[in-house]
Image: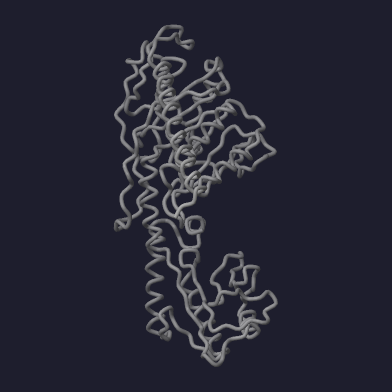
Amino acid sequence: MMTTLQIVLAIVGIGMIGAIVIYNLVQERRFRKEADRLFSHKRDDIMLGEAVRTDSSRRQGETRIQLTGQEAASPEARQAVEEADAPLRGGHLDVDFTFPDSLDAAKPRDEERPLPPPLGDLPSRRAPPSPQAPRQAPVPAPVAPAAFEVEQAPAKVEELGYLPPLTRSFSETALAAAELAVPPQVAGGLDVQTEFITRLKFASPAFTSYAGLLNSLRRIGKPVRSFGLRADGVWEALTGNPRNAYSQMELGLQLADRGGAVAQDQIDTFCRTLYTFAADAGGAVICPDKEEALARASELDMFCMNVDVLMGLNVVATDTHPFTSEAIHTAAAGAGLTLERDGVYHARDVNGQSLFTLINQEENPFPQDGRGLTTQGVTLLFDVPRVADGVNVFDRMTEFGYSLADRLSGRLVDDNGRAVSNDSLNRDRERLVEFYTRMQRQNIPAGGERALRLFA
């Protein structure tokens, strides 16, 4: 039975939710009216010196850029837009600027959506992505001069694998129709196969704090990597307060990890955060097609699910002779395993990468001094996609398991409690070879940089 206080709190909570909903509806209606007012009347084009009419509807195959402030016609702003989408492949992407008499003269080209990198024929293990809500017309907000807001449309990709030269048509200050795309190869060290990559181009290099931007991006819930281009042409990982000024940046939102594929709201938040930062810093942001990225993320996630395997062996004691931590510590140290601060023994390679682990089957971790604990069993774990040369590592783990069972007078069993035999080990090796072959075919080799990010 609810108390009076609970009833009052429930009423207050319902009232607050209702007020928030009403406030959001009012704000949305006001913003829509403001957008219609800004994009539906005739204004003079300070770049062309003539009157044009803004078409608030976005034509297929075009990219909308919003220029704000009197600096929109400045050489620096023009140059920022001109170079923002140039692929950093070691070559140069020429941009031909044309200025038609009216917006109707800027006819869009037929566009084809670029295909994502192939990830093989995978069985459908998840429901297809839910239909996305239609995009609304962009709502302008107070921004610093020479700031840009870019929303990416599909772009045609030639057989060579990179974007063809683009032709832009500018018809007024507040609207520039363009065709922009992040190239399939980037210069900053990001990975087009596993990341949603955006580019941020500044009108002029300046020393800026990125701490707030990086903190906001971390809250999205997916890994984000970012690099800045120094004046000497060297790309370096972005920090909160760098010592160098950057002319442009590349930022990548990881499409999938062990938490699943990236979601629509996460991509939206990622782009919106960059738009806000660019408005304050005076730059141009290019975000690639979101729907294509979501489809690619779903396919990548399904592939990762099918090879994300953790193999384990157990050494169990008899009811009358439990294992002591002293005996376990001696055996593990003799095999080259190290007890770390997490209370788990790790076998690592020369680069410090974990190959397999030894953990206590019971709740308590192993004590740091290796003394004072008894247990009925321990487990050897092998994280398949994170280990290179996995078959040999598996054999090493199995050999240590037999040695540990013999030394502790225990039994080596699988997760179902069955004794490990040569036949079962051969079946496990065959599965490992299959997993590693599939990962290699998808250009995600086990234990490689991509695999370590995807299976973190």
Q: Please provide percent x and percent y for residue 118.
A: 35, 51
Q: Please provide percent x and percent y for residue 423.
A: 37, 83
Based on the displayed image, in which of its 4 quarters is residue 419 positioned?
A: bottom left
Instruction: Report the side of 31 relative to 122 (left or right).
Output: right
Q: Nearer the viewer, residue 20 or 406?
A: 20
Q: Please provide percent x and percent y for residue 333.
A: 64, 79
In this view, 114 is above or below 325: above
Going 43% across and 34% down the picture, which residue do you hit? 21
Going 50% across and 62% down the picture, which residue do you hit? 447
In this view, 69 is above or below 384: above
Going 44% across and 55% down the picture, which residue do you hit? 1
Q: How many marks?
A: 0
The colour scheme used to paint the residues is one colour
Based on the displayed image, in which of its 4 quarters is residue 325 positioned?
A: bottom right
Based on the displayed image, in which of its 4 quarters is residue 123 positioned?
A: bottom left
Q: Please provide percent x and percent y for residue 84.
A: 50, 30
In this view, 285 is above or below 105: below
Instruction: Report the side of 99 relative to 244 (left or right).
Output: left
Instruction: Report the side of 401 relative to 444 (left or right).
Output: right
Q: Nearer the viewer, residue 11 or 300?
A: 11
Task: Report the residue that reaches farthest toward the top.
Answer: 50
Q: Nearer the viewer, residue 156 or 401?
A: 401
Instruction: Report the side of 120 relative to 455 (left or right).
Output: left
